[in-house]
Image (spheres, rainbow, N blue to C red):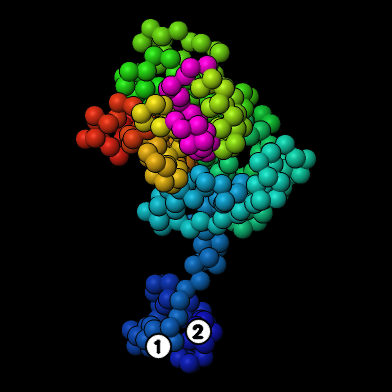
Amino acid sequence: MAGIKEIAKKCNVSIATVSNILNGKPGASDETKKLVLDTAKSLNYRPNRIAKNLKLRNTKAIGVIIEDLTIFCAPEILDGINEYCEENSYQMIIGNLRLYKKYESNYYLTEVYAKQVQEEFWEMISMQVEGIIYVGGHERKLNFIPENIPVPIVVVYGFGYTENKPIPSVVINDRQGAYLATHYLIESGSRRIGVIGGEFTSFHTQSRLIGYQQALYEHGIYFDTNIVENGNWERTSGYLCAKRLIAKGITDIFVMNDMMAAGVYDYAVDNGIVIGKDLSLVGFDNRELCTAFRPELTTIELPLHRMGYEGAKIMMTNLIKEKRSSEQELVLSVDCELVIRKSVKCETIHNDLENKKFGT
């Protein structure tokens, strides 16, 4: 592909003349303009947009730092960011930290974690991005973001903080999602609903437990701590928690993620329990494996694509205004949807609702 120098040489004019014509500036004759433009076309000339935008201090590029692309939530969030960037003619520069691959699920507890994240922020700044979106692997307080980053920052799937101030963040409305799941079980005839949560200290566990309690309260059902089990988000822990709950006579279970729900299916198969007949089950996430179960799992769908889209939208708003409006919410909580399938006992008489989604 030819550059300005090659065009100038072929047309026998100065580089400045070619540059002025290609940038629409006046001064050249119509004959020279035609010669330069025709030559540029014949040589398949393409302007260097990055260099031009750098000169204008406007790169039209957003940096996206992702904790790990292999975590299930990342692709959909990234696609939402990408969609909004496309609509606004922005490019994405992606930095994949690969934290889960390097340090496994407890990567955020390692000593090198915060340092690696901070280095990536400054690497993005060196690439002249106009703003940075940080995508977490799960929701928690992210208080290691550098204080003096000179561009807007938005956090998606986490609560962002520098040392001295909060950062605009986009999160899941876990409470609302858990409320939907529990309300649906109650409406289906359940009155004693067991819970399988993640680690007790998890933001997700705490928020979803509040939503569960809210639904119980609204229906006049006592909250029994003895039928709340905590796993570790993995399939094997779902199996063990199901064993303990079913031993207590529980026949209706809300599971706080689909991987632990898979463990409940495993326990049911091993013990001759038919889900959707002997046991009602609602999950959380709406991962692809939900439709591979038999019966298919009723679950809560995470609004991952919309979270990415809204995060990019907040970023663009801040770029246009140059600084965040005092009226802008620091945390945007995005609602979930209930996806009804076949894993709840009453669903056999509600086939017309199968695979439909319901919000608040």
The CA distance from mark 1 to mark 2 is 10 Å
Side of 121 where 49 appears, left or right: left
Foreground of the two, 229 or 148:
229
Q: Residue 2 has which mark?
A: 2
Helix, strand or loop under label 1 = helix
Camera-side residue of 44 and 358: 358
- Residue 42: assigned label: 1
Q: At x 42% / y 77%, what residue is drawn?
A: 21
Residue stretch rendered in magenta on the structure:
248-273
Q: Is residue 306 above or below residue 182?
A: below
| Residue 103 visible in rendering | yes
Q: Which mark is residue 339?
A: none
Label 2 packing within 10 angstroms: few (<14), some (14-19), many (20+) = some
Q: Amino acid at mark 2?
A: Ala
Q: Position of residue 219 (x, y in %)?
A: 36, 10
Q: Nearer the viewer, residue 211 or 306?
A: 211
Quarter assignment of residue 335: top left
Q: Tell me the residue at 55%/32% (across/down).
A: 238
Q: Looking at the image, is mark 1 or mark 2 earlier in the sequence?
A: 2
The amino acid beneath tag 1 is Ser
Find residue 150 and report its horizontal and vertical position in percent.
62, 45
Q: Residue at image x 47%, y 73%?
A: 47
| Left or right of 331 in this view: 111 | right
Taking the magenta stretch, the answer to whether it contains residue 72 is no
254 inside magenta stretch = yes
